[in-house]
Amino acid sequence: MNYRSYEWKIIYVFILVFMLIEVGSYMVLTISTQRIARERVQEDLQTGSDILGNLILLRSRQLALTGQVLASDFGVREAIATGDRATIESMLENHGFRIQAAAMLLTDMNRNVIAFVSSPVVPSQPEIVDVNPAILQDSARQQMIAPMDLQGETLFQIITVPINTPDPIALLSIGFPMGDPLWQTLGGYARANYAFLAHNGTGRWWLHASTFAPDMNEQLLAQFQTSGEVPQSFTPGEDEYLMSTKVLEGSDDVRVVVVLGKSMTEVMATFDQVQNNLLRWMLACVGLSMVAIFLLTRHLVGPLNTLAHLDTLTGVANRRLFDLSIRNLCTGTPGMEPTPFALIMLDTDDFKLINDRYGHDAGDQVLKIIARRLKSSLRKADVIARYGGDEFAVLLNGTSRDSVRQVVDALVLSLHKPMQIDGAELQVRLSIGIALSPDNGADATELLRKADQAMYMAKQSRESYVFFEEGYTAPEKEKFALQDA
């Protein structure tokens, strides 16, 4: 039995525990990172929604002030007073270009169309324009987001101001495009993709503007067409988007929403880089820790393990390790036939006399020489142990009675050679008892008892070794098979 396996078990346990701690910490950190990233994205989307609302409100006020300045212009009032449509349209085009308006609609106080012009910002209008009825019907509403005409799908931020002379003589509706400047400002502050969608009374949604990829735009349109909204977590393909929807102030028959979204893949890219670096550090720490655990175990646990399983004088196994080894052999592998083995007990004859005559140091030298001769005569797979003060025990694994006899004959020749101890030549004799498994039993205690009995009979009969023979018991006289050396 390899007693070093205990050290490896300790090493494996410590490494496994350390790796579980490292992996658990990494998983907790990964989950926390994803949670923090999602919270951060939600905050960014909320910030973007607030920025959008504030931008539209601020722009509405700026545009309303622009419209009021334009309505109070004397040239505008004079052109309207002429009643000439061409003059009015020319005036509207000039002023519209100056204030960067996309469309201008002039109606009387009953909301009858006097003139309608559009700039090159939007597609060319037909000669006869069907003005969006929502603009004409709600004269009290000064601001809205809607198309200016029924044919187009371009959204405008529309403000309506009266023209007074000093009494109101007309209403001027100015449409400013929900165009690139707003998108750039919104995207820069919100750090998100966005899409403006509108829904009219026919039940159809259309996309006005978007910074999402084309396939994402198609998925968004399909989602709104199906349910009229988009979930907070939207996964059109492999990439997950966190979404936020804000309803803008449209007209009665047009619903306008802006959808803000951020790709989790893009958000996690920065975190992934940090996590990859952390993973590299973790793997390096695991590797260094494995080396450290191995060295510490070998230097700290190794000596204790050796002290617990080896005899400090002879360097062979001690009684504890031998008992564990014989129990393992007796137990065997479940489902398989037990492996035959031989248990050999050896006792040093007249060892007390050696100690008394030559001293305990000489006795220790004798035990060391016996241990060395046993090692040199047996295989590495065989277990050699100092079982008591002057007793040794050997386990021969996978052997038959004949092969055991051959091994023991060689042992006797080696062990009975004279020993040189402090200049004196000693002839040391050992009594050997042998029990075979499974012939003499399969229980460790029983085999030890029988091998000890055989050893006792060898000592009493002055034979070199004795095989235990089953079938005869005390009290009268035990019968053994005696073999000469």
Image (spheres, rainbow, N blue to C red):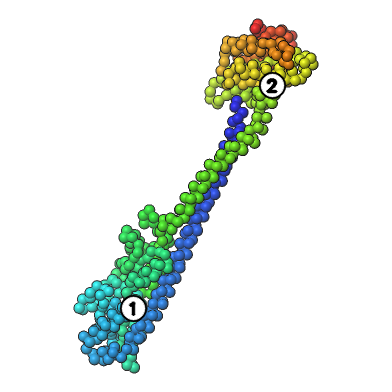
Q: Which residue is mark 2?
A: 387
Q: Position of residue 238 (x, y in %)?
A: 38, 53
Residue at the location (23% across, 84% down)?
90
Q: Splitting the image into 4 quarters, where does residue 423 fall? A: top right
Taking 240 as reference, is 384 left or right? right
Direction top: furthest residue: 484
Looking at the picture, does residue 165 appear above or below residue 312? below
Q: Position of residue 288 (x, y in %)?
A: 55, 42
Direction right: furthest residue: 356
Query: What's the amino acid at mark 2?
Result: Tyr
Residue at the location (40% across, 67% down)?
188
Direction bottom: furthest residue: 166
Q: Which residue is mark 1?
A: 158
Residue at the location (73% across, 13% down)?
424
Q: Position of residue 158 (x, y in %)?
A: 33, 78
Q: Position of residue 260 (x, y in %)?
A: 40, 65
Quarter of the picture holding the N terminus: top right
Looking at the picture, does residue 485 appear above or below residue 226? above
In the depicted view, which residue is nearer to us: 348 or 200?
A: 348
Query: What's the amino acid at mark 1?
Result: Ile
Looking at the picture, does residue 88 appear above or below residue 411? below
Alpha-carbon distance for marks 2 and 1?
Answer: 104 Å
Residue 285 visible to an observer of this rendering: yes
Taking 345 as reference, is 334 left or right? left
Residue 468 visible to an observer of this rendering: no
